[in-house]
Amino acid sequence: MSRLAKEDYKKAVEILKRYNYNCINILNIRADIMSISIPEHNGMPKASNHIADPVYHKYIQLEENKDLQKSLKEYKIVANTMELLNEECKKICNQYFILQRNKWDIMEELGLSERTFLRRKKEIIYTTDRERKKMA
């Protein structure tokens, strides 16, 4: 593994740490958009090719929401990263980045040395950066 640039390293760590936020953000934005009712214009003349489907309008709102798209992209990056990691790295990623547990507790629970923990953490971050660059 070659050394990552400082900015790339920080971006990968931020994506991992924002996983829970992104999950909640996705659910909230979708719920907000799906609960918005589109007013119907009864009695108004409509063009024959006009789509007046409220579902279509909500679909467009979902697709055009920049915050939702950013959260979905970061969620997919972490999901893809988790698929590529071995079981030990998955446990560390879940405990350290997602559940925000103390590294010493994780090391004790998994029976790892500090050096092994740091190697696994580095592997997680590098894999996340590779996935981030693929999605860019």
Image (cartoon, helix red, strand yellow):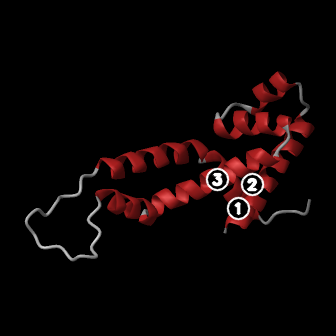
- The location of residue 133, given as percent across then percent down, is 73, 66
The residue located at (54%, 60%) in the rendering is 70
Q: Are marks 1 and 2 in contact (CB under 8 Å)?
A: yes
**Residue annotated with mark 3:** 76
Q: First in sequence: mark 3 or mark 1?
A: 3
Mark nearest the camera among 3 and 2 is 3
| Amino acid on which disc 2 is placed | Thr
Disc sitting over residue 128 in the figure: 2
**Image quadrant containing the N terminus:** bottom right
Rendered image quadrant of residue 50: bottom left
- The location of residue 83, given as percent across then percent down, is 77, 46
Direction from residue 47 to residue 98 in the image, left or right: right
The residue nearer to you, when weighing 9 against 39, is: 39
Residue 78, placed above or below residue 60: above
The residue located at (60%, 58%) in the rendering is 73
Residue 91, placed above or below residue 14: above
| Amino acid on which disc 1 is placed | Arg
Residue furthest out toward the left: 43
Rendered image quadrant of residue 101: top right
